[in-house]
């Protein structure tokens, strides 16, 4: 038998050799399935190397994947309600979705951005923008939960957001769609007269991560598309792309594509801080919400802010400059050194690279090509460092591997091009399937990229997976970039639109990851920390159930005295203190979702019974061998009934 | 170079041989990572072999995975609203979630069940139960969209559902929690007097798949847990497990675990049809919704049914029998031949196998051990075919490979045990990580299982993946069952709780999968089939926007004359007729989600502007190189303003 096996193995070896060259690749240049399989396989019980945080795009959420396996570990609800987790349904999280427009149950979330220290992703927080009703969310990477959502006033289509500065001093927000600021009833055709853009700088409290709008800059009525912070020498600056410098308001596909060059706006935010400190700003009335979740009370609050500080460029010399950039630039990406500012002109074939040093030199020499609304326009030739003649079409975004190489996506020609910083030469190109938007390299927009992998985030899926009717998942593709040539490893579908993503080494996140919420730190006003605290209290037409849950029963599990028309609040505390023992709670016929309560946490479900009867409630999360027995009843009597409030367990 | 390679390969071969035996497994019995990697890897551009439909459990949705890759292709919204797809938010899908309790935005979905023809999954429809507010949904597997949701009256906790008969004559629903039928205001302590169970048989129209409650059977106030249809000789019967035959109403973890045996209820539904045809039923008043989505109008309707036909066992001899089964049986599974009915007594170590032939024989001989509410109880010894002495603890569910083997999950001992039908001998066992609930073999509950793979659907995840704070994904594990011994291939996390799953060969689904909705077949009342039909019409305080969308603009894209207090309905038709070109639609500040409109489809977003101003709307799904330009504005004037309605594009 062993002899046969040896012969077989030898034959296999020869067969493999005849189809492969030495680096495991076939003659055609594609990786053999075998070695790609091994590179992406994470065996049962082993861990992925990187956390990848992908935006859900139009799902409004963030999804957490492992790399290289492409496995989805968690969908974090951020801007959209999620019945699975009770997010936006339970009383504790509803305030997170309050805005000046009322409760908004959905948004379009584009750019996850990790907090940084010294230009390195530090694993504390993840930020993401809400595009439609302009907001920024902060996710706590200890709990993997949304901790804060701040609304951005005077903004429409918050796309160029929430890119972070080198030490998380700020995250930013730029309006994609200009608006009347403040809003007013004017003809849309008066756009050029009445509409403005705004760039917002949101400061971060370094202990708590709390966000506040520090200041806004009132800008010409262009469309502000994307942004990136300076780093190294260019720390203190923020760069925003613009399009629609034509200031059109209709059929933009034609009307906003007329100018040969639009601009990158370079903002000196340290200069802005000086103007703010000197009082050289306008305090405008505003109305926007700051919503924060408290980890101990397990409750969110929503506060309204009534003013915002606005800087006017023509009153603030040195604050903003425009760098002409062909043509309708989309992404603006800054290389790890901070010297090169890459404009990805989406209707162009070539990439334009600006030099920060040349920009500063031109500013110092006051070499301007005119100005727009008080913003000096620099000369293209004075700031340009080089051009990458890519041979591709439709460049959108660039990231870096920390080895002196840049990787740019081309939407129209559906490929990623690898090129060399400073020589601008193209080193490699590889197709994507299909129509790539962003790409992501772990740490790839920071000062210290991890490199190793590149993920293409594609817009078209078509024939890549088993079909699922007219609607298809969007798709990510994982490439190995550790060698000279890029190698496609894996296609994996994603949740929503994986608009942009960021990744971080797992060992930065893991040590701080919470397993439970300590029950003794629970300060929820309706907590019941021991089963003997479980009770029901009536307060007018409100009924408050202080309920506990532990394997495998609720206390109380028989409730009477509730009447049609009451508002019944089930405040359920999970008494468990072990990792991965959540309990769920649902009651028949609620116009509401479930509760999914982590160990040590309290969550509240509002139920408004409309008909008399006896209704079951039960644990929705299979928790033990007797999970199916984890159930109770609540009796609803008619209005005016004299059935007394009672709450019992096991009686 | 070649020589070096040959030497290297030979050394590798020897190294592999020293750690592996002939079947690719190491001495310890685990598959080598290499061969498991190859078995689950689906190379870019290639297709998975099976579609797996997994319940979302407490997410309320169905998720579609590929096997063997474990990749998630789509989350189909079913019982829970989903802002990403506008499901439950747009006007077209809202009626799907109407119930007798009003609009219910969430449920707990447990058992996906494929329609069958001749006992084979046929790829037409997928059914799934709503547990909390009792319902069954039907998903159309041409579109992968929810086509119908029917509410189940006189039911609480619709868990033993929607198991299908051999030719999709019926799907069923059994109440997990007994209730007063009809509902009334009674003391919970009067349970034994006032509470009943019900078993519902929902007929299926064989052309359209439309569901109607054909009849219900009024049952003793036990808890009805799971079900499976007979097949082959036992076709015409349906089996339901019960627990809580103690009829306790509080602290069930103790009080419902007292009896040594509970029951499997065997229902002769062909006999039921005779009683119905003979008029031997009670027509009871009821109030439940039947909600259907029409593929041509792209709209759902919700209809109310007011009566239900109820059979009373004591009036219907031969309709129902009870088979005593130890102990608190959870799953009831019928082998491919239809002869063996396996009761998984969850507080037991052994499995109980009943014989259909013996059951019929005992019935014919009228050998009963008494009766309960007119239901004859058979004798345990008369119906038992055998016992599987598993050595495990806490058996829950059994599926079959079509080769004469059965596979049973053990929750408490966290393992799957493979055993042989008819000899009842244990052949193999393999651990799960951790606490497996259901398992799934492609076709594994049908007459003709595909076998090959087994998926364990686990309740506890803990240390299997990179941690994501207190909340962890539930987890599936994929095993190769093509050999004598089961082999673990892959851990993959899931959406929600993968409570149960079913899989089907991809080539059954693929040929019928829709790619687009033909525009010429669109009968939506507010469709605009060509751009020249785009317009805005005012009807009192309602404004109807007939909008079209095609790469890369909306028509109209400038709208005026809307006033604060109006209800603005954006009816957006996607004019595209290519696969995978959806467009999205969102407007700033809507207390609503987005629209995600497939080619040829019309969807409607309601927007109620509260403040004057000019608001942007835009396409949320990156559709073309000029997607960022795909945008428009709508002007909101004060109440009483005389700004006239106008709608323009490119003017």
Image (spheres, coloured by chain):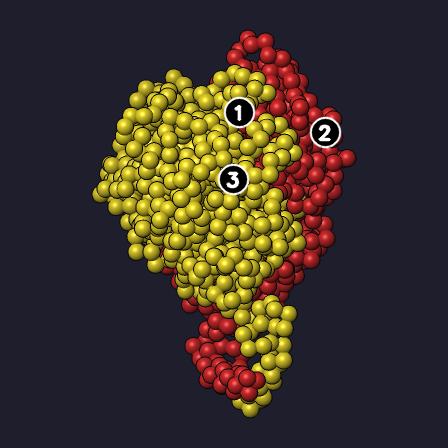
Chain colours: A yellow, B red
- Give whichever of discs 1 and 2 has the lower sequence position: 2
Asked which secondary structure carries label 2, the reply is helix
Q: Position of residue B557 (x, y in %)?
A: 63, 27
Question: How would you rate the neighbour count of disc 1 (Cα within 10 Å): few for under 14, some for 14-19, many for 20 or more?
Answer: many
The circle on residue B531 is: 2
The reply to whether residue A447 is in sight is yes
Reading the image, the residue beneath label 3 is A324
Tags 3 and 1 on a common chain: no
The residue mark sitting in front, 2 or 3, is 3
Q: Position of residue B548 (x, y in %)?
A: 68, 30
Q: Quadrant of the image for the C terminus of chain A?
A: top left
The circle on residue B576 is: none
Give me the C-alpha separation between circle 3 and circle 1.
Answer: 29 Å
Compared across the picture, whether B629 is left or right of A118 comes to right
Disc tally is 3
Residue at image x 27%, y 30%?
A277
Residue at image x 56%, y 39%?
A261
- Residue B240 vs B523, above or below: the answer is below
Give me the C-alpha separation between circle 2 and circle 3.
Answer: 36 Å
């Amino acid at each position: 038998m062993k002899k046969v096996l040896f012969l077989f193995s030898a034959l296999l070896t020869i067969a493999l050799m005849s189809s492969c060259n030495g680096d495991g690749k076939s003659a055609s240049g594609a990786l053999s399935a075998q070695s790609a399989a091994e590179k992406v396989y994470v065996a049962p019980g082993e861990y992925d190397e990187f956390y990848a945080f992908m935006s859900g795009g139009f799902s409004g959420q963030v999804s957490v994947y492992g790399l290289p396996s492409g496995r989805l570990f968690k969908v974090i609800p951020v801007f959209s309600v999620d019945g699975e987790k009770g997010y936006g349904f339970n009383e504790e999280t509803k305030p997170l979705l309050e805005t000046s427009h009322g409760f908004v149950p959905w948004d379009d979330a584009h750019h996850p951005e990790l907090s940084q220290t010294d230009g390195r992703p530090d694993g504390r927080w993840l930020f993401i923008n809400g595009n439609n009703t302009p907001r920024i969310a902060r996710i706590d990477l200890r709990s993997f939960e949304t901790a804060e959502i701040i609304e951005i006033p005077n903004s429409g289509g918050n796309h160029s957001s929430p890119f972070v500065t080198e030490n998380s001093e700020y995250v930013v927000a730029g309006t994609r769609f200009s608006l009347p600021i403040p809003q007013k009833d004017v003809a849309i055709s008066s756009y050029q007269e009445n509409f403005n853009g705004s760039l917002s700088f949101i400061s971060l409290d370094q202990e708590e991560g709390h966000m506040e709008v520090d200041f806004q800059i009132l800008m010409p009525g262009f469309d502000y598309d994307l942004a990136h912070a300076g780093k190294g020498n260019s720390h203190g600056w923020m760069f925003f792309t613009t399009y629609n410098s034509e200031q059109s308001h209709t059929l933009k596909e034609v009307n906003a594509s007329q100018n040969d060059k639009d601009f990158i706006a370079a903002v000196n935010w340290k200069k802005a801080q000086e103007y703010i400190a000197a009082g050289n700003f306008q305090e405008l009335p505003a109305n926007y919400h700051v919503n924060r979740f408290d980890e101990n009370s397990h409750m969110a609050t929503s506060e309204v802010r009534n003013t915002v500080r606005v800087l006017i460029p023509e009153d603030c010399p040195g604050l903003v400059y425009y760098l002409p950039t062909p043509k309708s630039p989309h992404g603006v990406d800054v290389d790890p050194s901070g010297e090169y500012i890459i404009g990805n002109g989406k209707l162009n074939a070539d990439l334009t690279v600006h030099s920060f040093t040349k920009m500063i030199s031109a500013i110092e020499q006051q070499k301007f090509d005119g100005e727009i609304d008080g913003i000096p326009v620099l000369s293209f030739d004075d700031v340009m460092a080089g051009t990458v003649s890519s041979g591709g079409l439709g460049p959108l975004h660039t990231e870096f591997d920390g080895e002196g190489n840049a990787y740019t996506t081309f939407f129209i020609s559906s490929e990623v091009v690898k090129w060399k910083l400073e020589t601008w030469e193209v080193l490699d190109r590889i197709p994507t399937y299909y129509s790539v938007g962003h790409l992501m390299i772990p740490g790839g927009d920071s000062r210290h990229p991890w490199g190793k992998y590149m993920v293409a985030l594609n817009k078209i899926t078509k024939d890549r997976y088993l079909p699922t009717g007219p609607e298809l998942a969007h798709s990510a593709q994982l490439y190995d970039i550790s060698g000279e040539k890029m190698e496609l490893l894996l296609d994996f579908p994603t949740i929503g639109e994986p608009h942009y993503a960021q990744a971080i080494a797992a060992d930065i996140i893991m040590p701080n990851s919470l397993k439970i919420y300590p029950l003794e730190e629970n300060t929820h006003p309706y907590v019941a920390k021991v089963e003997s605290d479980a009770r029901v209290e009536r307060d007018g037409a409100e009924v408050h159930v202080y309920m506990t849950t532990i394997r495998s029963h609720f206390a109380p599990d028989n409730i009477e005295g509730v009447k049609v028309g009451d508002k019944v609040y089930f405040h359920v505390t999970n008494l468990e203190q072990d990792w991965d023992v959540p309990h769920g709670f649902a009651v028949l016929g609620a116009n509401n979702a479930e509760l999914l309560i982590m160990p040590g946490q309290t969550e509240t479900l509002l139920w408004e019974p409309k008909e008399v009867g006896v209704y079951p409630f039960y644990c929705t999360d299979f928790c033990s061998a007797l999970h199916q027995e984890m159930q109770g009843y609540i009796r609803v009597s008619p209005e005016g009934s004299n059935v007394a409030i009672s709450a019992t367990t096991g009686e």
